[in-house]
Amino acid sequence: MRLAVSAIATLGLVALAPAGLFAQDMAAVCESLSDVEVGAWAKYEVDADGQQGTMRFALIPEGAADDEGQWFELSMDMSGQKMVMQLLVPSWPFGTDDIQGVVVKAGGQPAMRIPDTMLGMMQGQMDLPMSDMTENCAGSELLGKEAVTVPAGTFQAYHIRPADQGMGEGEIWVSEDAPFGLVKAEGDGGSMSLVEAGGGAVSTITETPQDMPGMPGMGNR
């Protein structure tokens, strides 16, 4: 299930904007979809290889850790299995190398902060859907603009085929009127549909994270 959820999340975010018929149109659309205000959140219903649940993206001003700065929070509840991940980032969108801190909370387990020493090693192995957005935006195929209806309402959305199809064939619908751009996604890994969205998001992790033990021979910081 974990791989399936990762696949559909990647499908939904890896290309946040379509390639327009002209370069200047493409640049304008990409820029508009990249503008996410701090506090914005979007919740989706997800079907990944027969596993149903919800996924929520949020850009929050303060995370569970003490580090100052804005955090991207990804929370999932798939078939009763819950997980929250917070990434300390300079802004949205961001690349793997921009991540300055990670906090993870799985189910009822304590929230854990990834040590900086481990983070440096993990960055080269992370495959995050929000990374390399510019390249994927430029190469995406615009299939048209159409009205698409999801539980959150009806949106005038760009229908596109992402440039990166490494996780399987898929198509997405994006709109300037939806936080993070994504309205709907369908592909080999499953589907996502926007349920609701809004502002004023805060950390869903209310406890102070514990330091995750580092690897033998390495300090936690």
Image (cartoon, grey):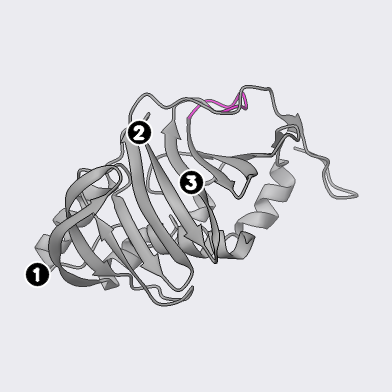
Residue for badge 3: 55
Question: Residue 157, relative to residue 110: is it above or below?
Answer: below
Under mark 1, the amino acid is: Phe
Which of 67/16 is in front? 16
Which label sits on residue 52? Answer: none
Magenta: main secondary structure equals loop
The alpha-carbon separation of the residues under discs 2 and 1 comes to: 30 Å
Residue for badge 1: 22
Question: Residue 215, relative to residue 200: is it above or below?
Answer: below
The residue positioned 40% from the left and 56% from the top of the image is: 192
Precedes in sequence: disc 3 or disc 2:
2
Magenta-highlighted residues: 63-69
Task: Categorize mark 2 by other alpha carbons within 10 Å: few (<14), some (14-19), many (20+).
Answer: some
The residue positioned 47% from the left and 62% from the top of the image is: 8
Under mark 3, the amino acid is: Met
Under mark 2, the amino acid is: Ala
Precedes in sequence: disc 2 or disc 1:
1
Q: Position of residue 125 (x, y in %)?
A: 63, 63
Instruction: Kindly check if marks 1 and 3 are in contact, taking CB atoms under 8 A apart as contact.
Output: no
Residue 79 as seen in the image, left or right of residue 140: right
Q: Position of residue 76 (x, y in %)?
A: 55, 45
Q: Position of residue 72 (x, y in %)?
A: 48, 39
Precedes in sequence: disc 1 or disc 3:
1
Instruction: Kindly check if marks 3 and 2 are in contact, taking CB atoms under 8 A apart as contact.
Output: no
Residue for badge 2: 40
